[in-house]
Image: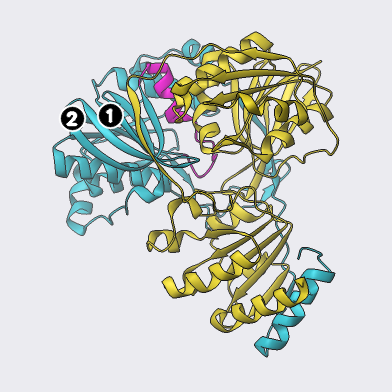
Chain colours: A yellow, B cyan
Amino acid sequence: MAKVLVIADIKEGVLKGSTAELLSKAKAIGAETAVVAIGSKIEPLTPELVGVGSDTQYIADDPGLELFSAGPYASCVVDAAKQFGADLIWFGFSESGKAAAPRVAVKLEAACATEITDVEIHEEQIEVIRPAITNKVMQRVKLNTPQLVAVVRAGAFEATEGITGTENVVKLSPPAPDLKAVIKELISDASGEIDLAEADIVVSVGRGVKDQAGVDLVKELANDLKAGFGSSRAMVDGGFMAHNKQVGQTGKIVAPSLYMAIGISGAIQHLAGMNGSKVVLAVNKDPEAPIFNVADYGIVGDLFEVVPILRDEINKIRT
Amino acid sequence: MKILTTVKKVVDVELTIRVENGAIIEDGLQYVTNAWDENAVETAVQLKENNGAETTLVSIGGGDNTDVIRRCYAMGIENGIHIEDPALDKADSSVTAKVLQKVYETGDYDLVITGKQAQDTDSGQTGIILAEYLGLPCVSNVIALEVVDDQHIRVSRAGDGGTEIVEVALPAVITVDVSINEPRLPAMRGVMMAKKKKINVMDLATLGISSDDISGAGPRSEIVEFMASQTRQGGRKFEGDAAEITAQVVNLLANEAKVL
């Protein structure tokens, strides 16, 4: 039986949905499951980690792990992987995962694959499916090592209802700090905002909203919907939206039930970040905008006129 | 400060890419400098201009890379190395990092700057693996950089919880995001000068790597086949009176798509 170690995705002390998704997939392929949780004051998450389907919980809880540092983070994963005898080591789609996975792979002399959307195990041979070339093609990749370290693309696996695990806690010793790359400070995202990666609805703005007033107009729609509020690269470069709001190949990959692209033309780098969305609505005044080629519903019109109507109509239907 | 940047020649993602029988159809493809690598080059050139640095680029594979390397010269890079060897045809991130390790060790560099990923593989591993092989500190997804002193840089990294400020002891490896800077367009004078500059082309033997070193390193992963991407299909597009069509679309989102 394959052994899958999932790295718990924890942000501001909250366990994120990818952990349940990855553990569900591991159970679905009949694997023995373990989770490794890394951070400070995270031990109280243990019952939740069991609840999402882990049979062993490796816990690295130390004040030195409060701020992310890739080296020590990777050391904790390596420690857990060795103790567990993991064949497959899965990170959820996150910046910490992308930074740590290659380090873990080197230390374990294992293959590493990022952005995987599926995994197949034939006898001893592991293969993964992943997008490449800015999502324009898919690749089937064969791994030449018995172990695989992978970062799973957002939205690739679904959480199964009613799954559960067994409590078996193993405490890990704190890793040595990285003295050559010292994290001095974390300039936090505005906390309390809805996490783009977790949101069921994402509303994003592009160049078409023009300025801060346009951004604010669309933000009201996002607030009404309790939606994540994202952006194309143009609005980030223009200084209107924070870097961590950027949806696209170089930013966040999102896969919500509904994605609303407001004033976004649809450059392929942006499309690569949202094409896993279930339903896409686009509002753009240019009927030829490429975003309409991927939108299930397209409204051709002036967003300054359309967005307030959109809010009204949605509020009507929801009350 | 001696800086090494890496530059990869990659397929132009703006063009249509077709797949047939598990392979990408080469006909009609064009090749360009990897976008993130242009940011790495710009970072190096700015360090040269503002702090004084010697800049070298290395490019691996890609056939005739003269155009890509000369473009980087025209942007301000001083030295160029091109490693070309049939043994590297199936190189994955770990093999590429092994070759870069050898290049690094021949040059006494203080800082390696790579793009955070290449737009053909979208893997984002090579720079990080290189740092592990070299035992150097590494910060990935860097969006700002300043020099503290001869031995330290301070970088901003776009992390999960916000912007992480990290002080890094040199020598080190950083991988940069596109938002770190706006790569300059080479000036005409630079382009003319670049044509005269030498490119140091080497194969693995010249670099001092045997094929055993490569097979020992991997490749740990091999692409078995390419498949067409499941592209989204466009649906219905509504034009006309804004109030009318918007109400219609909201109704469809609620009752047909059932997402509201």
Instruction: Locate residue B112, reporting x and y percent.
Output: 31, 30
The residue drawn where x is 14% and y is 39% is B51
The residue drawn where x is 46% and y is 48% is A189
Residue most extreme to the bottom: B241
The residue drawn where x is 68% and y is 34% is A19
Is B122 one of the magenta-colored residues? yes
Residue B53: tell me if it is visible: yes
Q: Earlier in the sequence, mark 1 or mark 2?
A: 2
Residue A106 badge: none
Q: Chain of mark 2?
A: B
Is B110 one of the magenta-colored residues? no
Identify residue for label 2.
B1
Residue B87: tell me if it is visible: no
Q: Nearer the viewer, residue A157 or B186?
A: A157
* Residue A26, image quadrant: top right
Residue B111 badge: 1
Instruction: Locate residue A126, reporting x and y percent.
Output: 72, 23
In the image: residue B154, left or right of residue A222: left
The residue drawn where x is 81% and y is 64% is B258
CB-based contact (under 8 Å), mark 1 and mark 2? yes
The image shows residue A66, relative to residue A239, as above or below, that is above
Instruction: Locate residue A81, reporting x and y percent.
Output: 63, 15
Q: Which residues are magenta?
A: B117-136
Q: Secondary structure at mark 2?
A: loop
Quarter of the rendering occupied by the C terminus of chain A: bottom right
The image shows residue B97, relative to residue A78, as above or below, that is below
Crowdedness near tag 2: few (<14), some (14–19) or many (≥20) residues, C-alpha within 10 Å:
some
Instruction: Locate residue B84, reporting x and y percent.
Output: 41, 29
Q: Secondary structure at mark 1?
A: strand
Q: Amino acid at mark 1?
A: Leu
* Residue B226, image quadrant: top right
